[in-house]
């Protein structure tokens, strides 16, 4: 996670003022955040289910929401939200206790620098985990697509490891007279050759094993033996490859011309169905589960997987009604489960006495409620089988699908583990358990950067870029945000990121004045050419406390012959909150000159509107995190719309930044947004040459 990203933060503390102090401390440290104070367990559960959060900070002695309860709720919902506890006790004991609860770390109260370092570490680790999950999903999707291609290939393909066929597609099996690939898997390859060629093949495979299967693509001619024992001259291509992360040999036999109809039959729907019950089979269900995991991760929904198994199947069913009766019961069980489906649900037969039910959108409580309904429905049903009547029970294990879910097999393993937990609850069966993870298994650089910026100022290695801010209300205003870049070789770096981290007030103030002077000179040239441009200029916290800046601005405007109304000074919300009196005075002075004032990163902190009671701004640019939630993460636009509406009611114009997709425009028009900015409009450019016409 970049240091410029807004932290989505949950705070648990019985004292609201202390929660506000933490928010202010983060702002002062340059870490923009959208914090939410949590006052109850129910509120925490709802927040975790409704939105994505980056971090939870909880007071160790909180009574409203005890840390143990908070951590258990996170674990139960299977949310990847690292938790840090704040303790008033010193020593290692609170750390040990907190780590046992599942916290990532425990920090002593008021040790802010320690807390910042721990937060930085955990946010970086969270970003790595999210990236790893994304890569894992893509990797498994790639493997799945590769397997589908193998399964549907007209070529006969088999993978051989240590002489055994570990995979064979149906084309391979049918080539030699077998029903399916499963009929030949885990058989020795040499058994499929005629006896006269087995010794030579054995030596070949032995040498491959010695060489760790390092075989370049080569032709191998041999006489195969069909299932009926008939010899079949065969020509195959053999090469080294990997299957299930193991080195092996691929044996590929080119397809024959008349396989098209057989291939189409193999790809029909019946291939995905269990022949007894008509439900999806295990293989197809795992594909569906993998797709659901990907969809859940992209939408922030929570899904559910139920593993449903008949209790003591052999004892209560097979020994009573025999194999044929057991099959009849399974058919009726499948019909009963199908009758319980809701829109979007997927049910499959997983094993001889087990089924899986995939629910794409649910909550933990709802999933448990539905599981209990199913267990009651089955327990109350009288089954007819082999001329006898039976009453059976099922036990259900539930796992959740969330942004923290791994592969389909991992989610399924969690459901199986939950099923084992359900069985332990009662000897008579008919129980339900939700999977919950086991928490017990869970100075020189500053000088360098400062020197680089100072040298760039002196050597003229700074440049300005201009990004248009487009009015959605058709005002015709030609507004550009001014961005400064430091040219370092072929790179263009943002020096403010260095300066804000360094806290060098003198250098920051000097940088601000250079940007202002250079930008208004460029604006004067544009105005002389007939373009009535408006500049949106960023002001650092150092300039807010520079009492001489307003007077200097008056002189600069007159010298450049630029009307003050054409300049909007943009302050960060965290800078306003941290320097409230200075921000109030600066805002009043520049507004008296005729300038306008904007606040950016608006919406961060616990109560963003509080600062606006003291500092009257003309424009508010909402924090990019609100846009990313809707545009990139697929969340509801309600939060963004509510924020825009509140600003409108306060007579404050609104800029929504980071717009990259046209799909955002209808939402923004409906909310009454005044301006939009982002790569959808135009990327930052060297010149102020954007066409603001709405034609």
Image (cartoon, rainbow, N blue to C red):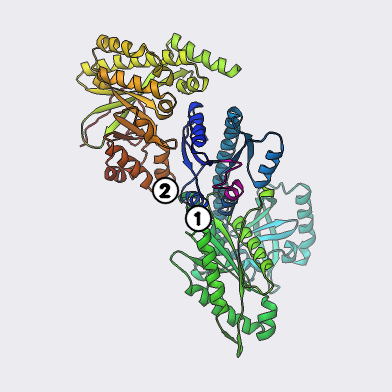
Picture coordinates of residue 288 (x, y %)? Answer: 52, 60
Q: Quadrant of the C terminus?
A: top left
Kind of element beneath mark 2: loop
Q: Nearer the viewer, residue 688 or 215?
A: 688
The answer to whether residue 483 shows anywhere in this view is: no
Task: Report whether 556 appears left or right of 21.
Answer: left
Picture coordinates of residue 36 (x, y %)? Answer: 47, 42
Reply above or below: 613 against 244.
Answer: above
Is 87 in the magenta?
A: no
Q: Residue at x 61, y 88 (%)?
A: 386
Location of mark 1 (residue) = 302
For marks 2 and 1, the one nearer the N-term is 1
Q: Residue at x 45, y 64 (%)?
A: 344
Reply above or below: 218 against 23.
Answer: below
Reply above or below: 532 against 664.
Answer: above
Task: Report whether 654 appears left or right of 21.
Answer: left
């Amino acid at each position: 996670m970049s240091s410029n990203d807004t932290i989505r933060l949950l705070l648990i503390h019985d004292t609201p003022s202390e929660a506000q102090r933490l928010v202010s401390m983060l702002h002062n440290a340059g870490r923009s955040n959208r914090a939410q104070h949590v006052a109850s367990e129910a509120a925490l559960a709802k927040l975790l289910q409704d939105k994505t959060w980056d971090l939870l900070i909880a007071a160790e002695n909180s009574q409203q929401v005890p840390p143990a309860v908070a951590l258990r709720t996170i674990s139960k919902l299977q949310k990847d939200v690292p938790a840090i506890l704040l303790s008033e006790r010193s020593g290692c004991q609170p750390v040990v206790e907190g780590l046992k609860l599942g916290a990532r770390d425990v920090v002593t109260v008021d040790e802010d620098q320690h807390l910042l370092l721990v937060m930085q570490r955990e946010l970086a680790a969270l970003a790595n985990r999210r990236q790893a999950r994304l890569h894992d999903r893509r990797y498994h999707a790639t493997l799945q697509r590769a397997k589908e291609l193998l399964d549907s290939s007209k070529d006969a393909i088999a993978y051989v490891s240590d002489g055994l066929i570990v995979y064979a597609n149906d084309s391979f099996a049918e080539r030699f007279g077998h029903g399916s690939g499963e009929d030949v898997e885990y058989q020795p390859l040499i058994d499929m050759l005629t006896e006269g060629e087995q010794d030579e093949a054995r030596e070949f495979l032995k040498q491959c094993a010695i060489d760790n299967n390092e075989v370049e693509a080569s032709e191998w001619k041999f006489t195969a033996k069909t299932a009926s024992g008939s010899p079949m001259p065969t020509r195959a291509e053999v090469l080294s490859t990997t299957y299930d992360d193991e080195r092996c040999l691929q044996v590929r036999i080119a397809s024959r011309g008349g396989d098209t109809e057989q291939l189409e039959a193999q790809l029909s729907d019946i291939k995905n169905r269990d022949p007894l019950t008509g439900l999806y089979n295990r293989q197809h269900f795992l594909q569906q589960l993998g797709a659901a995991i990907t969809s859940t991760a992209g939408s922030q929904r929570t899904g559910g997987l139920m593993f449903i198994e008949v209790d003591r199947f052999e004892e209560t069913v097979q020994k009573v009604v025999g194999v044929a009766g057991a099959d009849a019961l399974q058919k009726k069980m499948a019909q009963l489960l199908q009758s319980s489906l809701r829109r979007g649900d997927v049910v499959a037969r997983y094993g001889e006495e087990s089924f899986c039910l995939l629910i794409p959108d649910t909550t933990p409580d709802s999933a448990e409620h539905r599981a209990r309904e199913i267990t009651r429905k089955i327990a109350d049903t009288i089954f007819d089988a082999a001329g006898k009547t039976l009453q059976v029970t099922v036990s259900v294990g539930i796992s959740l699908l969330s942004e923290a879910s791994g592969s389909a097999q991992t989610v399924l393993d969690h459901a199986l583990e939950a099923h084992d937990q359900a069985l332990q609850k009662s000897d008579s069966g008919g129980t339900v358990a939700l999977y919950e993870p086991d928490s017990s298994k869970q100075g020189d650089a500053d000088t360098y950067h400062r020197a680089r910026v100072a040298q760039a100022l002196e050597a003229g290695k700074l440049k300005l870029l201009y990004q248009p801010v487009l009015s959605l209300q058709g005002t015709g205003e030609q507004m550009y945000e001014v961005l400064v870049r430091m040219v370092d070789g072929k790179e263009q770096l943002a020096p403010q990121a260095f300066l804000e981290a360094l806290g060098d007030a003198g250098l920051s103030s000097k940088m601000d004045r250079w940007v202002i002077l250079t930008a208004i000179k460029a604006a004067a040239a544009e105005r002389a050419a007939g373009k009535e441009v408006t500049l949106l200029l960023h002001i650092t916290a150092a300039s807010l406390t520079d009492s001489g800046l307003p007077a200097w601005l008056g002189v600069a405007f007159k010298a450049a012959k630029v009307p003050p109304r054409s300049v909007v000074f943009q302050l960060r919300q965290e800078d306003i909150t941290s320097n409230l009196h200075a921000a109030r005075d600066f805002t009043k002075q520049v507004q008296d000159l005729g300038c306008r004032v904007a606040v950016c990163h608006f919406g961060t902190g616990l109560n963003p509107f509080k600062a606006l009671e003291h500092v009257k701004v003309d424009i508010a640019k909402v924090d990019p995190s609100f846009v990313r939630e809707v545009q990139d993460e697929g969340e509801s636009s309600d939060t963004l719309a509510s924020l825009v509406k509140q600003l409108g009611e306060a007579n404050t114009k609104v800029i929504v930044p980071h717009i990259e997709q046209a799909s955002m425009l209808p939402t923004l028009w409906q909310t009454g947004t005044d301006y939009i900015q982002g790569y959808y409009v135009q990327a930052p450019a060297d010149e102020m040459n954007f066409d603001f016409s709405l034609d």
